[in-house]
Image (cartoon, rainbow, N blue to C red):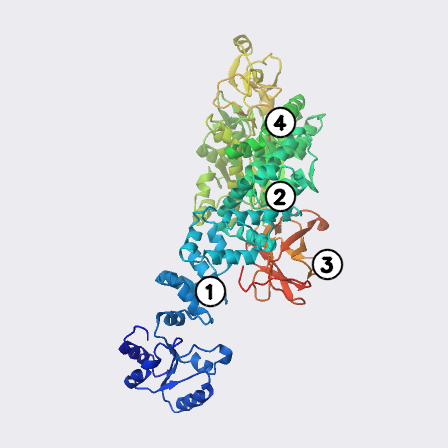
Amino acid sequence: MAELDLAQVVQGITSLFTEDNHFVFWYDEDADFEDNIPAIASQLSQPVVTVMPNNQFEVKIRLTEMQRNGESALVYSPKPEPDLSLNLMADMLRYSKRYAADALTMLKEELGLTQPDARDFLKQYAAFFANKERKQRFAKLNYNDQPLELVLLAALAKAQSPALGAILQEVIQSSLDDDNEVLAQFDKYGALDVFWDFARKAYGFDGDHETLKYLFTAMFLNLAYDQADRGLPAKLEAYKLGRANNAITFIQNTRNVITCREPLQRVATTVWEFINGARLFEGMDMAELALIDAFPQIDRVILKWVTARLLAGDYGAHAGRQTIGELIVNRLGRPYGENYASAYQIQQNALALLTVRPSDKPADLSAAIAGYIGQDYQLDTSYRHFTAACAAVAPELETLTEGIRAKVENAYLNDFLADSVRNWTAVYTAANVPSDRYQRNFYRQYVSVSEERTVVIVSDAFRYEAARELQAQLDARDVMKTQMQYLVTGLPSVTYFGMPALLPNRALSYDGNKTVLADGQLVNSTGLRSDALKAANPASVACQLRDFTGMNSQQRKEFLAGQKVVYLYDNQVDTTGEKAVSEQSVFTATQTAITQLARAVEQLRNVSVVHIIVTADHGFIYRYSALDSANKIVIDDAAWEAAGGIKKEQRYAITARPLEITGVSHQRLGELMGNDDARFVNYPKSYNIFQAPGPSQNYVHGGSSAQEMIVPVLDIRTRTGRSAAEPAKLHDVTSAPRITSRDVYVQLMQDSALSETVTAANYLIYFEDADGNQISGVREFRADSRAEAKERIQRVRLTLKDAKYLNGRKYMLVIRNADTDEMQRTPYTMDMVIGGGFGFDI
């Protein structure tokens, strides 16, 4: 008999008898207490009924009779509990209590283990179950009829589920070396060999080295060559997996687990270094490399290739069927694309700038304006995005795009900007600007004639090209309608001339230094501008945009109440550009302004403002490369004195008489301002600057160019209520929805092109069985096409796990919106002969 006091046994049995429980079953597997049953029976109030394998029917009849009479009994057996199919007491056991007098049996009962080998399992891993926390973790994970050893591994790894994949996801949180913390736990409790046994069965991992480094090397190599649609080369035969599909599925699924993305990337990098990936993949064709995303370093190879193509001027190069532009977009959407986003964005914007041909030399000012607002502004946008991407690129990625900046800088400055400014100045005169395009007529043309309340947002130095980007963002929403117009500033194209021109005025006058009067009044502050607005319409007000956006909704309503005209001023772009310490961030500030202006428009819509106009006082020119002496025009003292110099800045000079200097043109100030001012504004005919003091050199404005003088008038009409826009829908258009191999190719179609009522959406694509269990890897899919219908169909490959599948049974293709979790399922018929099935989840 086991070392246990009989009094304790009697007490334990007695406690199990209750008003609702009349039978206590005790299976004494090793007959440890068989000799003590008479003594125990003498101390019990209930009789003892002994059951043996050969008298179950007799005992069952007796117990049934006792139950009918409301009697109780201890049902004792000196034998193990029979299997369910042989146990005639099974039904009574379900509503009765069990008793066990040894630790293993009690633990088995506590954990609810019914497997025939449960005692041996508990005995083998007694050290593990000696800890309460580990025991509770095991109990929580013991579901879904998984092998007990797999549940044990999951508990030791602190995995989320009793599946090998979940265990491996915990394993990769540590290193692949011998000091792996999870494997150390397996080894400590004698389960390390069990772990490798599961790995062999699930992945067909039969290498000579049972180490994590070899296992994951095999997994990543099989994924890489599978993606390239190639078999493993002979020299890598040792890494061939018998069940590679399961390894591929594990990696694809794990990439979608946020907590595993960084560890999995670290594992991929370790493998890459272990196999000397740079040498291994150097001979692979770019068409094949472009298909691989197993290793983050593949992106480095691709980035170098794209850089080489751009530097060689080979803009039409292909990687397989993909153009360079398509390849970049594809890689940005891949698992490691985010890591290399700034480098790819450098290449993407460089490609756009290098391949867009500027408009032809204009015959007149009208053609110059049409060329710029029709297409040339896009080059400024590409240069802005390119320069911002260069500023944001991580130091370790700079070498991957080395040389592109110099090429783009040269192309932008010499092939575009130089000609753009030269062509503009060749045809520009104040007289050539149509009167309805004078900036000084803005209030009269756009504000005073508006019957509804009009909110004007004046963003200092908000260029036309930036406004077009803002317009595209607003047009994507069906609650807004926009129309883009333009105005031409006077000269100099600076704040103190542009801001008064946007106010109501009958006459503008330059009062010297940095002062322009509107109808004889100072308007160089928000308060004074508000006064000027009220003079034209008492129901007017002005404030800084940041003050308005800082209000809550009720405060905004109160601020706007009773107002017919509202001016909101934003100056973040100009403030950033005009400081030497921050001018290099002017393009970043421009992007921030676009975002904040879009937000301000939405805030205005939310308080029922229907009519909004976004405009600017002037634009600017920015170049990244430093100016040298050849880019600076020197005005010597004699020339300055002869011209009667009044004020000089980098892009303009105001004088009493024209400056007689080569490369400099001039306009009479009176013609520019619509008065009789006889002074002159002088400006470079090129993008050069005057040698003049100033905090910034690369960010300049005030001169004559489309970039400085064409300002946007973005007219916005809003409507209240919720947007009717919906995310782009996907559906399966596969002609024969059947599964004939583990690699399943499905055809997905985006129902409608992106528009103001159709927005981009992210989807997860995978297969699942009838019980909702995922049986394939997960593919991420972004529905963002604006193409024609036939071009909105894409082929996606999904890889099934190795498992037992039943031919003729339906399995579901799931298309799940990653943002809303909305799902659609398409049945696929299994039609292949598949082996597999391991008796455990992988």
The residue that mark 3 highlights is 735
Which image quadrant for residue 621? Answer: top right
Residue 602 appears left or right of 752: left
Q: Label 4, secondary structure: give it.
A: helix
Measured in 3D between alpha carbons, the distance from the residue under mark 1 to the one under mark 4, in whole angstroms, is 63 Å
Say whether disc 2 or disc 4 marks the residue closer to the N-terminus. Answer: 2
Q: Amino acid at mark 1?
A: Leu
Q: Kindly identify which residue carries mark 1.
A: 148
Whichever of labels 1 and 2 marks the residue nearer the N terminus, that label is 1
Crowding near pointer 2: few (<14 within 10 Å), some, many (20+)? Answer: few
Which mark lies nearer to you, 3 or 2?
Answer: 2
Q: Quadrant of the C terminus?
A: bottom right
Q: Quadrant of the N terminus?
A: bottom left
Between 481 and 313, the one nearer to me in the picture: 313
Residue 589's x, y, as percent? 51, 34
**Residue at point 52%, 49% (across, down):** 209
Q: Please indicate whether residue 311 sits to the left or right of residue 586 in the image.
A: right
The residue that mark 2 highlights is 235
Q: Earlier in the sequence, mark 1 or mark 3?
A: 1
